[in-house]
Amino acid sequence: MTIKRLCRLTVLSFLMLAFLAGTLLTGCARHPSPEELNQLEMTKQAALAAEDEAEAKKQERMEWEAKLKQKQAELQQAEDDLKAVQEAMAEKQ
């Protein structure tokens, strides 16, 4: 290795080390502001409210689907009864 290459490698190593140290020191020293904390809390509350609303809508959908199945069963029973009456009427004629 030549001296020029060695000097360049040393300088680059020190620059990278300084950049890394600066990034770690400033990144660790920064704390969230009260506005950021308030915004985070509001976002959290909005997410929880949306989850609650989604769960309520899911429950409501399940109730409507149960009612639909019940009405479909009633309709099928009425159609079966109608068919039986029509067949009985046809036999009498």
Image (spheres, helix red, strand yellow):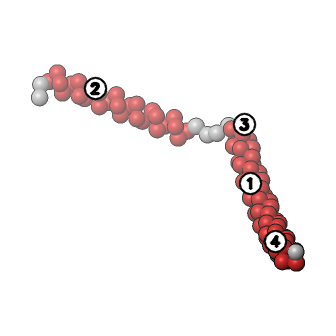
Foreground disc of the pair 3, 1: 1
Q: CA distance from mark 2 to mark 3?
A: 41 Å
Q: Residues within 10 Å of mark 4 (few under 14, many from 20)?
A: few
> Mark 3 or mark 2, which is nearer the start of the sequence?
2
Of 19 and 38, which appears nearest the observer? 38
Which residue is labeled 1 in the image? Answer: 54
For the residues labelled 3 and 1, the Cα–Cα distance comes to 28 Å
Q: Is residue 43 visible?
A: yes
Local packing at callout 3 (Cα closer than 10 Å; few below 14, some 14-19, many 20+) is few
Badge 1 local density, few (<14 within 10 Å), some, or many (20+)?
Answer: few
Number of labels in the image equals: 4
Q: Give the Cα distance between marks 4 and 1.
A: 43 Å
Q: Foreground residue, 93 or 76?
A: 93
Residue 11, label in figure: 2
The mark that comes first in sequence, 4 or 1, is 1
Circle 4 is placed at which residue position?
83
Quadrant of the rendered structure where residue 5 is?
A: top left
* Residue depth check, mark 4 versus mark 1: number of the one nearer the observer: 4
Residue sitting at 72 percent across and 40 percent down? Answer: 39
Q: Amino acid at mark 4?
A: Lys
| For residue 22, above or below residue 93 | above
**Which secondary structure lies at badge 3?**
helix
Q: Amino acid at mark 3?
A: Glu
Rendered location of residue 88, percent (x, y) = 85, 77
Q: Is residue 29 left or right of residue 41?
A: left
Q: Amino acid at mark 2?
A: Val
